[in-house]
Amino acid sequence: MKKYMYTYNRLVLLLIFLPLTLQAISQPKNYEVKSPDGNVILKVEAGNKLQWSVAYMGQPVIVPSPISLTLEDGEVLGDNTRVKSAKTEELNSQFNAINFRRTVVKDHCNQLTLQCKNDFGVIFRVYNDAVAYRFFTKKKGDIIVKQEEANFNFSADHQAFIPYLRDYRGGQLFNASFESPYRVQKLSEFAQDSLSILPMLVDLGGNKKAEILEADLEDYPGMYLVLNETGKGLQGLFARYPLETKAGGFNMMNRIPVKRADYIAKTNGTRTFPWRAVLLSKADKELLNNDIVQKLASPPRIEDISWIVPGQVAWDWWDGYDIFHVDFKAGKNTPTYKYYIDFASANHAKYIILDEGWSDIFDLNKLNPKIDLKEILRYAKEKNVGVILWASWAAITDQMEQVFPKYAAMGVKGWKIDFVDRDDQPAVASTYAIARLAAQNHLMVDFHGIYKPTGLQRTYPNVVGYEGVYGLENFKWADMNMPEYVVTIPFIRNVAGPMDYTSGSMRNVTQADFVARDHAPLTKGTRCNQLAQYVVFEVPIQMLSDSPTAYMKEQECTDFITSIPTTFDETVPLDGSVGDYVTVARKKGDTWFVGAMTDWSPRDLTIDLSFLGDGNYQAVVFKDGINADTEATDYEKEVIPVKKGDKLKIHMAPGGGWAARIIRL
């Protein structure tokens, strides 16, 4: 009887408490993290769906948005989430930056780490100017990720600056140059037949902006954005894993996937995944000084960085070897490159590039018979000029184990690697393999024809350049609104990291006078717009894109350009409006450099010199000439005394610019 009553009582208790237990299990758990200054609030709901939301200065930005990883066996990390532990902590440190806009980056945020059942978790970080999250897994062996769900559900149908994917290589959607102008439209108007590359900027109203990007993209495909089912939110889309490729694209130099798997990544089961980040600003100029990608990237994996030397490069390809008044036929030959070396040496440029044509494009051991590479390298060393070689990504991935040590031993300083044009998992992984092997051979890397930077340049600081931008080269064949574009990319594309826009044209014209042409190409906008780009853009390995002949004819401008460093100790954003104008100051040693640019609207601005230290300074100023609106090469140089607190009134012509070097006396 006692045994019966005991069993009966247990059954009664079970019937009483089971509904309460089930209710407790099904109830979502909610978490909240604030930025150090309290202005950014991130909330996480862990229940049937794992969702995040963000508010900035009291304004909802991201409303509840589901995130998850789906594995091959059907397990969805993020559905029916069971949190085992939650840890909130403050992170406050700093690190030395390399090849960047400042020497020291302060890294201060609050972090929430959720450890969940089923051997996974999510880390959330909340900065004063950004939020970010990443998944991590602790599973045995390898796993296959079929899909990642990354949603950014905005609170309203905001306008956005959308860089649509275009120029598909080999007709394949996920093979592209990643060079895109911006289309400004509401989120609900997002093109249904395309994808957006990153970063993408969203206008929240009231001068506030949100910018979506990713960081620490290692051994994983890059993220694109498409409109999600809310009609005003965005979701991530990823290239599926390539199973088979063939040669194709430009000059058959691309590797075009012709068969893809039904998953996006196969990877180690114990790892962290890329960060999904949203930058937040209350004024456009704040976007010019955001370090979030550096903060989220993996720390450097190179101990000795003394051999990594950024600088300016005399470049042969854009100007088409357009040199004259010489006693040799200009082209892809030894005398031409010696001439470029002489020019670089005389004008304090650190490097020249031997672009496409110095070797066979498929076999980097097979030299152009008109090129005596040993003699070019000998002569360059004598003149204290470094040599960088161009190669396709396909050729490098085939031959880098042989050619990196071979050409490094001969004295080559780096490689410009072109036509990656993919960001699926193997392509992304290859950039780390290239950077690692290049570092072992003390070689710098300038990635061209590639997706946006995501932090590799911090992990491997020998990566000194990235394209992923609609650069100056497009003037050779396209009629685009470049003056508007160049005052847009500092706020969007350049936030992700260094870019290879290839500035420096001396053949400047107005919109009315522009024609696209391959030989002696023209550029829209004024001479001073080109000069200002050397200050405004962040380009550690910066091109002198025009010909030595053109620069020598314009020695005054050339001297100014080559006085501008390519990395800086400090950056002060002064003013700006995305797509309208930009003004920024950068410091190197005791010298400040200031650059300003405008779109096709003539513009009057005030440059506030409050950033200067005490004492007297001298400003060497290049400004648009009085006739620059009709003759874009017109400029005026002046040297004026300045001091801290002075306010300089400047005027820029349509497509114009203003630049100054301010020297402490």
Image (tube, rainbow, N blue to C red):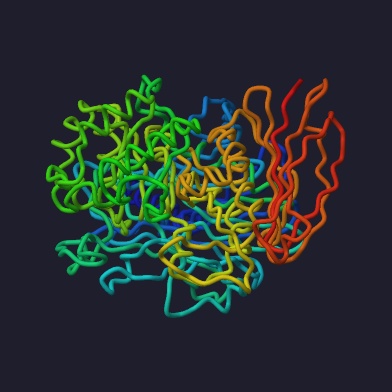
Where in the figure is residue 159, as x and y percent of width and height? Answer: 64, 70
Can residue 582 be seen by looking at this rendering?
A: no
Residue 621, located in which quarter of the rendered image?
top right
Position of the C terminus, as image quadrant, is top right
Q: How many marks?
A: 0
Q: Is residue 587 above or below residue 124?
A: above
Where in the figure is residue 207, as x and y percent of width and height? Answer: 75, 58
Identify which residue is drawn at 56% across, 25% down.
94
Where in the figure is residue 482, as x and y percent of width and height? Answer: 58, 64
Can residue 492 be seen by looking at this rendering?
A: yes
Q: Nearer the viewer, residue 375 or 473?
A: 375
Q: Is residue 158 above or below residue 564?
A: below
Where in the figure is residue 623, as x and y percent of width and height? Answer: 74, 48
353 relative to 162 in the view: left or right: left
Identify which residue is drawn at 74% across, 60% down.
653
Residue 407, located in which quarter of the rendered image?
top left
Q: Nearer the viewer, residue 433 or 306?
A: 306
142 relative to 166 in the view: left or right: left
